[in-house]
């Protein structure tokens, strides 16, 4: 399959598929359940990606994939020995194909039939959101099995007999964490995991995300389950702070058609505070314009929070002013503001530094970020403010990265179109590693 740069028009892709003979190429679950889970770990290597695992195919085999809050579907590498007796093509023109919003159809594969070589098969465009490379691939279905328990005695697997996903190519896994063979989409798209699992198992279209730091365990919980943590603590919905999930009117995917909306999760940040003081910002950058530019989104593939240049300067200047008494250290890429880590105190919620608040519509909905989520320890002993300069004209002005979300429970309620967040679980003397289900 050919590599496709980000932002490639779909009409050009279809023509390209014809020229290159693009190898073209929901049903009920077997175990009724109120919730299923995905375990999460953080790649301690340079990628800093969040990795999950599940079982797929017949016979079932373990598969690892990078978690992503973007993307249209789960995709896995079908070139590297995908063997299963239960995979089925999604025919061109079928209801599932139409719901996937695909207008591509595989018709010119002359090799032996396999998941990546099928005809009259709905075509998708799996993308690597780390390297921003996309390709063409068949949309097929196969068995998917997920755990129903977490951190307790192993329980039965919940099985989706015909889970829809897209076949990717081996080259598409470049840049992903070692041992992974695809990307698991948690977006709001029709065939991303949250909506497809809800339709399969008939539970609420809602999931909770609890990202761990390196060396610990985290979880994604789909459906209706209590947010229970050791030691004996249950996080109720009433204790979460909620803010609306916004829809960007223009797709942010690498491949899209005109008129598509973004499947990513945007929130309405209206201001930023450091140590309780408002940071002067160009407020127009915080709004999404008619071209889909600006605003704030959440991303699990961005390891650190990325800020448009003027916002980055304003935040780092304000933070530096509030920490003038702490000895500085030389900057450590990609960070601009670093301190002598031995001179920074420690608290239950991380390094003793000023808070950063993301004001979400109103003062009451501020997401307060403490030192554990704002500061990054480097190998040389420096402690750096974990925000990155995203340039003067990024597509999105503020990208809340994975580090800022760690050990916070985030509830994505797709039915109510709202995001619930706990702020740091460390304040409650627990963390994502202590989550329990079953």
Image (cartoon, rainbow, N blue to C red):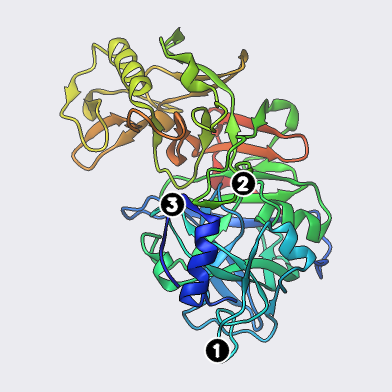
Q: Residues within 10 Å of mark 1 (few under 14, many from 20)?
A: few
Q: Disc 2 or 1, which lies upstream in sequence?
A: 1
Q: Residues within 10 Å of mark 2 (few under 14, many from 20)?
A: many
Residue at x 34% of width, y 16% of height: 314
* Residue corresponding to mark 3: 6
Residue at x 71% of width, y 60% of height: 148
Q: Is residue 65 visible?
A: no
Direction bottom: furthest residue: 112
Give the x, y percent position of residue 100.
69, 58
* Residue corresponding to mark 1: 110
Q: Disc 2 or 3, which lies upstream in sequence?
A: 3
Separation (CA) of disc 2 from disc 1: 49 Å
User: SS at mark 3?
Assistant: loop
Q: Disc 3 or 1, which lies upstream in sequence?
A: 3
User: SS at mark 1?
Assistant: loop
Give the x, y percent position of residue 39.
57, 57
The image shows residue 21, relative to residue 338, as above or below, that is below
Separation (CA) of disc 3 from disc 1: 28 Å
The image shows residue 98, relative to residue 388, as above or below, that is below
Closer mark to the observer between disc 2 and disc 1: 1
* Residue corresponding to mark 2: 435
């Amino acid at each position: 399959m050919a590599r496709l740069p980000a932002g490639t028009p779909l009409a050009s892709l279809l023509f390209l598929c014809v020229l290159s003979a693009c190898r073209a190429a929901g049903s009920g679950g077997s175990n009724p359940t109120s919730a299923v889970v995905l375990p999460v770990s953080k790649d301690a290597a340079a990628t800093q990606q969040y990795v999950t695992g599940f079982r797929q195919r017949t016979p079932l085999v373990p598969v690892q994939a990078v978690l992503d809050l973007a993307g249209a579907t789960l995709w896995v590498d079908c070139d590297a020995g995908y063997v299963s007796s239960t995979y089925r093509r999604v025919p061109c023109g079928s209801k599932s194909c139409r719901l996937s919003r695909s207008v591509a159809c595989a018709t010119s594969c002359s090799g032996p039939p396999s998941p990546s070589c099928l005809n009259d098969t709905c075509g998708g465009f799996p993308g690597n959101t780390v390297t921003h490379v996309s390709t063409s691939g068949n949309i097929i279905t196969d068995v998917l099995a997920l755990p129903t328990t977490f951190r307790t005695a192993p329980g039965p697997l919940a099985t989706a007999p015909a889970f829809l996903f897209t076949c990717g190519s081996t080259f598409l896994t470049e840049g992903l964490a070692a041992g992974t063979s695809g990307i698991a989409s948690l977006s709001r798209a029709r065939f991303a995991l949250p909506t497809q699992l809800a339709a399969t198992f008939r539970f609420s279209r809602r999931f909770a995300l609890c990202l761990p730091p390196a060396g610990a365990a985290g979880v994604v919980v789909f459906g209706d389950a209590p947010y229970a943590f050791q030691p004996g603590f249950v996080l109720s919905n009433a204790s979460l702070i909620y803010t609306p999930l916004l829809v960007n009117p223009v797709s942010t995917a690498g491949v899209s058609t005109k008129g598509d909306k973004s499947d990513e999760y945007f929130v309405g940040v209206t201001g930023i505070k450091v140590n309780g003081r408002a940071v002067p910002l160009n407020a127009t950058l915080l709004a999404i314009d008619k071209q889909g530019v600006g605003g704030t989104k959440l991303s699990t593939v961005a390891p650190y929070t990325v800020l448009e240049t003027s916002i980055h300067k304003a935040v780092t200047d304000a933070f530096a002013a509030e920490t003038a008494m702490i000895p500085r250290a030389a900057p450590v890429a990609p960070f601009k503001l670093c301190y002598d880590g031995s001179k920074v105190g420690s608290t239950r919620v991380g390094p003793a530094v000023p808070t950063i608040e993301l004001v979400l519509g109103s003062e009451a909905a501020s997401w307060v970020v403490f030192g554990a989520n704002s500061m990054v320890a480097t190998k040389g002993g420096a402690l750096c403010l974990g925000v990155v300069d995203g340039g003067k004209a990024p597509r999105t002005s503020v990208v809340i990265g994975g580090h800022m979300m760690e050990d916070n429970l985030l509830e994505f309620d797709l039915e109510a179109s709202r995001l619930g967040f706990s702020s740091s679980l460390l304040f409650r003397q627990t963390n994502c590693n202590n989550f329990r289900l079953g």
